[in-house]
């Protein structure tokens, strides 16, 4: 077993619960669908962020351990640590993504997904490929038990073969009972061991090579049984 795991990369806190983590995931993924259904062309990104926060609160979740993000159009290429350009309006033919991390009681949820409005084939391909690459990486993890580092090397190669650039500013991270940052703050891309189920978030952020737009997808590393 790798030193990284022995050093506590996969430790959990006293409130950790498999059932609790799965409930948090289910509620978070439902919130993604609920928020996306309320996004409309003509909205300003800041309005959509406030709407997303309200959906989470109304669903009984707590705004938790990273900001609630809704990114429109040109802001979809930005690393998450950089603020969006203000005042971006969603167009009739456009792309947006959500990145939310609410807390459900003691447990962390984290999910992200991209959506296309109108008809723009490049945007649709990018959004679809972000989700497809997530599952391609997940399949390799299940079959070959690659290290976190090797999973992201595979993701990088595959993204390039699809015609996209993988943003390494989003290298995956731990998830657990709140707060995981008190347990471990290292990234999945730096893990020199095969990650376990229910411990890690795999993040995929694809960008157009000309940096005109991007797409994002993230979820917990889980087996096929948890996916439709």
Image (spheres, rainbow, N blue to C red):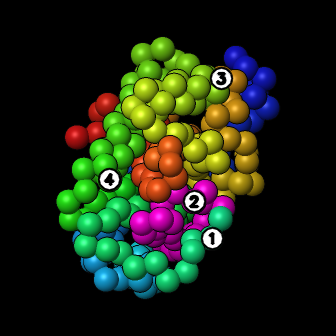
Q: Nearer the viewer, residue 8 or 94?
A: 94
Residue drawn at x 63%, y 37% as measured from the top left: 188
Is the residue 1 above or below the residue 114 in the image?
above
- The numbered mark at residue 83 is 1
Q: Which mark is residue 78?
A: 2
Label 4 crowding class (10 Å Cα cut-off): few <14, some 14-19, many 20+? many
Mark 1 or 3: the one toward you: 1
Q: CA distance from mark 2 to mark 3?
A: 29 Å
Q: Point out the tag, 2 or 3, that comes first from the N-terminus.
A: 2
Q: Dot 2, crowdedness within 10 Å: few (<14), some or many (≥20)?
A: some
Viewer can see residue 192: yes
Indicate which disc, 1 or 3, sits on the residue closer to the N terminus.
1
State how far apart marks 4 and 2 are (Cα).
16 Å
Cα separation, mark 1 vs mark 4, equals 22 Å
Q: Which residues are magenta?
A: 58-81
Residue 181 screen position, x and y as percent: 71, 54
């Amino acid at each position: 077993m790798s030193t990284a795991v022995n050093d506590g990369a996969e430790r959990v806190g006293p409130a950790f619960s498999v059932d609790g983590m799965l409930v948090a995931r289910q509620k978070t993924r439902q919130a993604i669908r609920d928020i996306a259904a309320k996004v409309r062309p003509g909205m300003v990104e800041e309005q959509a962020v406030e709407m997303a926060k309200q959906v989470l609160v109304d669903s009984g979740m707590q705004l938790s351990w990273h900001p609630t993000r809704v990114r429109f159009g040109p802001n979809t290429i930005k690393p998450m640590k950089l603020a969006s350009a203000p005042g971006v309006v969603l167009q009739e033919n456009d792309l947006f993504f959500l990145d939310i991390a609410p807390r459900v009681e003691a447990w962390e949820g984290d999910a992200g997904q991209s959506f296309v409005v109108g008809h723009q084939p490049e945007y649709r391909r990018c959004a679809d490929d972000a989700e497809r690459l997530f599952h391609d990486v997940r399949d390799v993890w299940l079959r070959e038990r690659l290290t976190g580092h090797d999973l992201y090397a595979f993701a990088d190669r595959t993204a390039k073969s699809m015609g996209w650039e993988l943003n390494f500013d989003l290298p995956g991270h731990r998830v657990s009972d709140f707060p995981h940052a008190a347990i471990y703050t290292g990234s999945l891309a730096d893990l020199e061991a095969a990650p376990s189920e229910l411990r890690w978030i795999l993040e995929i952020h694809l960008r157009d090579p000309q940096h005109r737009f991007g797409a994002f997808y993230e979820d917990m590393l889980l087996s096929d049984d948890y996916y439709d």
